[in-house]
Image (tube, coloured by chain):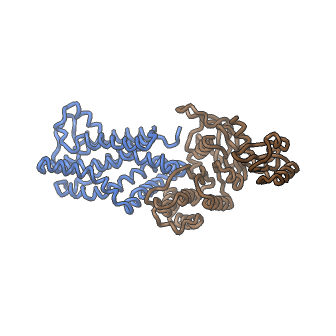
Chain colours: A brown, B blue
Amino acid sequence: MNVIEAVSLSKIYHRSRTQALSDITLTIGRGEIFTLLGRNGAGKTTFLRIAATQLMPSKGRISVLGHDVRDEPLQIRSKIAVVPQEGSTIGPLTPWDHVYLTLLARGMSRNQAHERSEKTIERLELTEYRNQPADSLSGGLKQRVRVAMAVATDAELIFLDEPTLGLDAVTRRRIWGVLNEIQKEGRSILLTTHYIDEAEILSNNVAIIDHGKMVLSGSPAELLRNVKEHVRVDIVGSTFSEEELNNYGRVVKLAERFRVLTDDRLGRELADEALKRGSDVGLARVSLEDLFVDLVGRAEE
Amino acid sequence: MSGSKQFRAAVVIGYMLSITWLRRNLLSLVWLFATPFSLLFIITVTTGGRSFALGVIGSLLLVLSTVGTGLAGDATWYRLETKLQDFFVASPVNQLGYLLGIAFAGLFFASPALVVLLPLLVYIGLPLIALPIVLLSLAGVWLFSSAIGYLVSTFTSNLRNGWQSGLLLSVLVGILPPVFYPAEILPHNILLVTYAIPTTNAALLIRDAMGSTPTLPYWSPLTGWLLIAVSLAIALAVTSRVARWRQP
């Protein structure tokens, strides 16, 4: 069964006359981590807010956990939890207060709320800080508290709107670990991010959104099949001209380096030649980032 | 969630946003005490103590109306900065539970002031038997102000406007109406306008409960209760229909 089914979903903000979403059709399966990937302002948050019953759609249909978002929000709300984008913790409340009290407010018994709070605080490695006022915590710890407030619930579907925005690499990986654990419990996750590595590592399926339109969707492996080239060669301090590199494959200029997207054989030949000429060279498989830059960059042009 | 669970959620939200805060931030009390007690002091000193009772009544009503209208700022902060409203929209807590929760937070914030002012009111002449009447009228003022404050917050697009709207509403509901001064001195037409504000009627009802029944055109204790009930019903009806829970 799918947890989210959207058909031709559109959203127009009449006040600013902005078409935030246009004709989005996608399905998210139970137990999946599904990522909406896109640049700032692409429409990811708008989709998430509509699915989380926080925002009305303008056109199209979307059902969440079998209920229509427009007509049956109450049935949906008892089974979901959300980490909104760029929120903050509440001043002097401790991490424990944030987690335990929101569980009580959602209707959990004291015992159950206590047990789940303990487990979640431990899981997000907040035990050391559990009784410290939130306003004395670092940004990363505050964000872990906000994630804990949603993860601790018994929601079947959890929405996380850019949960790792601005966090250091260690904290990001800690949050990824927790998301993987809750997926193993059979719960589903809709995640938005503009971190491509995050989407690639965490997701079962990804949808790339740009200017409110869905550009591509599928598993990271399926998406990569859309890239003709298999490898990328990064050359720094190049003694090659751009014309010369064009003979090996598609060239992308990235600040002080050239990136050449090509096939395995030409990639190896180019790397060997670059080493001979004394350039710094990197050879790797193409990633979701190459696809993303290609798709979104092409649309921009 | 059932009605009783929504009520429980409201109490938890109220506790979360007030008691936990006050326990670690006693300075918040100074803010709440400052205006009503300053006005009480000024009124008492300038009238040689003759208007002390009016000052206490006014302070009580100002405290409760301020924590209600203050939601224009607080609820804007919960919506735009902490995103607590978004968190609760996508949860089993409904809009009424949330509104009652943030209103309870205001009430709990006001409780230390009430603990000082209510016994003072009894000390200066309120019969204990009339205390429920006073509490009921105060409850009407608190709910009315909270509904209006929350309603305004849902249409406020930045935090500064939220705080400013709260201050303006506080003046309109808690200071300008005849709560710190006798309604009898107001010109007829202005007096009629102030009848529409629950704080006016609550002040008159408390005076009545203390044995000094106001003699005013078109006003009686029954009218006073009726006006509080009608204004509260309108405020709650408008808020539940118009306030934005899910954004359009």
Residue A20 picture quarter? top right
* Residue at position x 32%, y 49% in the image: B139
Specify whether B32 is left or right of A248: left
Q: How many marks?
A: 0
Left or right of A180? Residue B215 is left
Q: Is residue A68 visible?
A: no
Residue B185 percent coordinates (x, y): 16, 37
**Quarter holding the C terminus of chain A?**
top right
Q: Position of residue B123 (x, y in %)?
A: 18, 58
Find residue A292 and report its horizontal and vertical position in percent. 72, 44
Residue A202 position in % (x across, y down): 69, 55
Q: Quadrant of residue A185?
A: bottom right
Q: Is residue B217 visible?
A: yes
| Residue at point 53%, 57% (across, down) | A139
Please identify the residue farthest to the right as the structure is shown. Answer: A265
Direction from residue A249 to residue B83 in the image, left or right: left
Q: Residue at x 35, y 45 (%)?
A: B69
Using residue A184 as the reference point, say whether residue A165 is left or right of it: left
Position of residue A266 relative to residue B192, above or below, is below
Q: Nearer the viewer, residue B69 or A16?
A: A16
Closest to the observer: A72 or B160?
Answer: B160
